[in-house]
Amino acid sequence: MTIPNLLLGLIIAILTATIYHFIRGGNGWRLLLCVGLSVAGFFLVAWLGGLIGWGLYHIGAIDAGLGVVGSALFLIFGDWLIRS
């Protein structure tokens, strides 16, 4: 994976985290948690999708569709763990 692909993945994951944080609200620490969870979910699910052979929406070498789904799942699960 090249550096431009990594940067594109980071931008998409951080954008997903900021949108989620805007909807759910919270302070700066929660935003950092959202960014961390989103980046981890994006790259983990995109990597797993590549191993299995699944794809949703490819942009270059990055599967942005599965990455956003992974980000959303990690964000929802992390938010559920924090608020419960």
Image: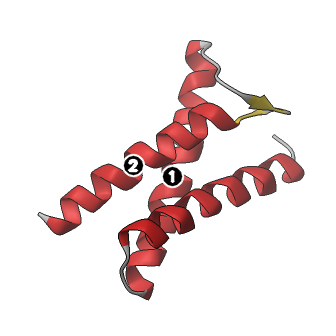
For the point 72% across and 60% down, the residue is 11
Q: Which residue is mark 2?
A: 74
Q: What residue is shown at x 71% (from left), y 27% (from top)? A: 57
Amino acid at circle 2: Phe
Vertical side of 38 occupied by 36: above or below: below
Please tell me whether mark 2 sits on a helix, a strand or a loop. Answer: helix
Side of 70 relative to 1 (left or right): left
Return the residue found at the far bottom.
28
Q: Nearer the viewer, residue 13 or 49?
A: 13
> In the displayed structure, would residue 13 be above or below residue 24?
above
- Tag 1: amino acid: Ala
Disc 2 to disc 1: CB gap under 8 Å? yes
Residue 43 appears left or right of 37: right
The CA span between labels 2 and 1 is: 8 Å
- Residue wearing tag 1: 40
Residue at 56% x, 56% y is 39
- Residue 2 image offset from top left, x and y in percent: 87, 45
Task: Give SS at disc 1.
Answer: helix
Give the image location of residue 70, x and y in percent: 48, 40
Towards the viewer: 17 or 46: 17
Counting residues from the start of the chain, the first of labels 2 and 1 encountered is 1
Which of the image's four quarters has the C terminus?
bottom left
Name, please, the residue furthest toward the front.
23
What is the x, y in percent for residue 1? Answer: 81, 40
Residue in the foreground of this view, choosing between 1 and 27: 27
Q: Nearer the viewer, mark 2 or mark 1?
A: 2
Task: Pinpoint residue 31: horizontal percent, then vertical percent.
Answer: 46, 76
Residue 13, quarter of picture: bottom right
Q: Who's the residue at 63% across and 33% down the image?
A: 65
